[in-house]
């Protein structure tokens, strides 16, 4: 296994549970934010639901060793083949390597994994709150609601630090939902935090809130909307080793009656109902 | 690969003694396979030599606070903290599933006192369908000021002797690399009645987040596993093989068939795959296939031909 960090590839060892994919395009769409489109010649599983994720193998030579979890931002089936979109921010070694992938690079991944967002009951309104790179799974949810004819019920709120880091939502022709954006420095959209956008939005008993982003942001959303809406759902992050439930490495604390317990973000989550979460759940995420 | 001299299919069966017979030498390592439920979505559990389940204690344990895992060069540190469902729930809820899937089950047992190990072992011995017990001696002994059983040959031997008198199940004793004296430890547990030794468990380490100046793990210390520990594990397996007559089970960074073959040449009769399972759930099956191919290529009819075949010194 000396595949190295470039695009040269040795045949995947067999048998393997990983799916073979090929990079269609990999482009930097904002500062440090990349949009990776993968083609899968053979898609034999059920279609992923919004909020599910994949474990991406970054290297075959053991460095980095572990797979990296990424939310599925978009998915399209074309007969037996499929196309998957991942949107990633460069934060370290693994995501750094991923920027070197270009059209034709082979990629191996495990998934789809975890439980996605429960779909809203008919007649409810959905507020999607995305902080930074928490956007991808909510894009998948918005796209899925839109293609199910429910785009009109959706309001997507998206906040970033500044304009440079922001994905321009107007470049996604299939999004088809109302959205509002904000930046901390006011360089794009409203100035402030995404929770300020949320404060300005109408939340009622027919509203469902879906959130994904940095832990402090999700905690603020949880505090604001709990008890004021029909239900709220949070896609949590945690350090993961396996991504499919066998290592217990991704534990996060949740409510269990009057007590608490640890659950696995990868297999009981990553999406949890707000009813289960406490302030500590976000501190650990 | 030219097809000349087609060799007979080598026999992969392994008899570890006292009723623990594996259809092939590849087991899953404790704590890296859960209780087999998630894994069974990817592979047929009956194709494995054995499933070694997550360490079981008398009562359920919640485990350590997060973060519980952190990556290191060619490895990872974990501080899961022995989270498990407890022996009662294991027997009622987890074991039936494993048996239904045709798995050979080895139960990793842990405790804070000799008495706790004993009670868990006695409970397990009432379930005659268990293939064997792997005794995790890397646990702190609360009656001896928290010193790990596995750090002191006398304490380890005392524990194994108690368990030996309480069960007829195969007793595999899992050695800790944190004990400096592997041959001494292996001999001590062999004399106390162990049927086999498995090694290595994780190597204690730590990591620090320099921005927050906090430990990277909630449990402060963690256990190092993965390819990074393979050379250490290989050396220790070789030492243990030289020290005892009971079978040695090699563990540590096995991710490819060639790694497993190295452990077999060093003296292992069987191996366990741990961290590499996280990277690809079919790793154990790939290792089985590769071992068979190696034996076949080398014209060996069984594992015994390769086991402990290391040539040291002048090849002349
Ligand atoms: C379910 C899930 C879905 C995710 N979806 C996306 C996504 O759609 N897009 C995206 O850009 N990122 C996503 N992430 C985060 C992504 O997995 C990490 O950014 C990535 O693993 C970092 O890899 P690296 O090698 O570049 O960083 P490393 O070198 O491993 O670490 C760099 C920094 O990132 C932090 N970090 C590492 N792993 C994680 C993690 N799992 N969660 C939080 N912080 C981490 C470290 O503390 C460190 O500060 C998701 C994480 C989870 C758990
Ligand atoms: C996440 C994790 C949890 C583990 N839990 C246990 C355990 O409960 N009992 C035990 O004896 N060993 C446990 N181990 C150690 C492994 O069984 C194995 O000895 C070690 O990881 C070295 O093998 P590897 O490099 O193939 O992973 C654990 C290892 C990991 C990575
Ligand atoms: S990452 Fe291994 S159990 Fe969740």
Image: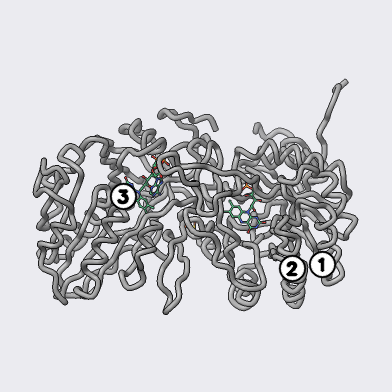
Figure check: A101 above or below A222? above
Q: Residue at x 26, y 51 (%)?
A: A136
C-alpha distance separating marks 2 and 1: 8 Å
Q: Nearer the viewer, mark 2 or mark 3?
A: 2
Q: Are marks 2 and 1 in contact (CB under 8 Å)?
A: yes
Q: Which residue is mark 1?
A: B163
User: Which colour style is shown?
Assistant: one colour
Q: For this rendering, which residue is in front, A146 or A266?
A: A266
State left or right for residue A61 relative to residue A90: right
Is disc 2 placed on a helix, strand or loop?
Answer: helix
Task: Report helix, strand or loop for mark 3.
Answer: strand
Q: Alpha-carbon neighbours of circle 3 within 10 Å: few (<14), some, or many (≥20)?
A: some
Residue lying at 30% horizontally and 48% vertically, measured from the top left: A84
**Left or right: B259 in relation to A54:** right
Please provide percent x and percent y for residue A82: 31, 50
The image quadrant of residue A163 is top left
Q: Which residue is mark 2?
A: B117
Label 3: chain letter: A
**Residue B137 in picture, x, y percent from top left:** 73, 57
Mark 3 and mark 1 on one chain: no
Specify the subunit that label 1 lies on: B
Res B44 → quadrant = bottom right
* Residue beneath disc 3: A82
Tell me how many marks there are.
Answer: 3
State the CA–CA distance, disc 2 to disc 3: 51 Å
Residue at image point 72% right, 55% down: B148
Question: For numbered disc 1, what is the local secondary structure?
Answer: helix
């Amino acid at each position: 296994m000396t595949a190295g960090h470039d695009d040269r590839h040795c045949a995947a060892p067999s048998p393997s549970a990983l799916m073979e994919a090929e990079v269609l395009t990999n482009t930097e769409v904002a500062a440090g934010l990349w949009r990776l489109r993968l083609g899968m010649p053979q898609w034999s599983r059920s279609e992923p639901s919004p909020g599910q994720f994949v474990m991406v193998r970054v290297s075959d030579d053991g460095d980095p060793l572990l797979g990296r979890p990424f939310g599925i931002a978009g998915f399209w089936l074309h007969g037996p083949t499929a196309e998957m979109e991942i949107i990633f921010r460069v934060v370290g070694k693994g995501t750094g390597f991923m920027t070197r992938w270009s059209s034709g690079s082979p990629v191996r991944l495990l998934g789809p994994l975890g439980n996605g967002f429960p779909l809203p009951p008919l007649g409810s309104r959905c507020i999607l709150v995305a902080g930074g790179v928490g956007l991808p799974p909510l894009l998948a949810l918005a796209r899925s609601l839109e293609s199910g004819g429910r785009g009109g019920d959706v309001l997507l709120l998206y906040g970033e630090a500044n304009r440079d880091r922001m994905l321009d939502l107007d470049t996604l022709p299939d999004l088809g939902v109302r959205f509002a954006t904000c930046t901390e420095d006011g360089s794009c959209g409203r100035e402030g935090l995404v929770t300020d956008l949320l404060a300005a939005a109408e939340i009622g008993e027919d509203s469902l809130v879906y959130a994904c982003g940095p832990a402090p942001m999700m905690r603020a959303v949880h505090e604001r909307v709990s008890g004021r809406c029909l239900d709220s759902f949070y896609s949590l992050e945690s350090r993961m080793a396996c991504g499919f439930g066998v290592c217990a490495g991704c534990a996060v604390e949740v409510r269990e009656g009057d007590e608490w317990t640890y659950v696995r973000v990868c297999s009981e989550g990553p999406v949890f109902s707000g009813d289960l979460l406490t302030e500590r759940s976000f501190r650990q995420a | 690969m030219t097809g000349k001299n087609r060799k007979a299919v080598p026999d992969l069966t392994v008899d570890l003694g006292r009723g623990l017979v594996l259809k092939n030498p590849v087991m899953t390592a404790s704590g890296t396979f859960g209780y087999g439920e998630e894994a069974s979505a990817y592979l047929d559990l009956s194709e494995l030599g054995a499933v070694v389940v997550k360490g079981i204690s008398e009562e359920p344990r919640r485990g350590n606070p997060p973060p519980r895992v952190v990556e290191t060069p060619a490895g990872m540190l974990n501080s899961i903290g022995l989270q498990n469902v407890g022996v009662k729930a294991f027997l009622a809820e987890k074991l039936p599933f494993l048996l239904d899937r045709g798995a050979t089950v080895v139960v990793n047992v842990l405790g804070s006192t000799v008495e706790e190990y004993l009670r868990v072992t006695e409970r397990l011995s009432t379930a005659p369908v268990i293939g064997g017990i792997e005794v995790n001696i890397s646990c702190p002994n609360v009656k001896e000021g928290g010193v790990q059983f596995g750090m002191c040959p006398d304490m380890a031997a005392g524990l194994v002797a108690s368990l030996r008198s309480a069960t007829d199940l195969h007793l595999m004793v899992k050695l800790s690399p944190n004990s400096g004296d592997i041959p001494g430890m292996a001999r001590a547990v062999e004399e106390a009645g162990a049927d086999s030794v498995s090694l290595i468990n994780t190597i204690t380490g730590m990591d620090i987040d320099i921005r927050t100046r906090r430990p990277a793990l909630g449990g402060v210390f963690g256990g190092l596993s993965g390819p990074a520990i393979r050379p250490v594990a290989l050396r220790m397996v070789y030492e243990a093989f030289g020290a005892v007559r009971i079978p040695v089970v090699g563990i540590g960074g096995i991710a490819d068939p060639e790694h497993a073959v190295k452990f077999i040449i060093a003296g292992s009769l069987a191996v366990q795959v741990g961290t590499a399972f996280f990277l690809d759930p079919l790793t154990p099956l790939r290792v089985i296939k590769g071992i068979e191919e190696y034996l076949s290529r080398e014209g060996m009819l069984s594992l015994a031909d390769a086991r402990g075949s290391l040539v040291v010194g002048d090849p002349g």
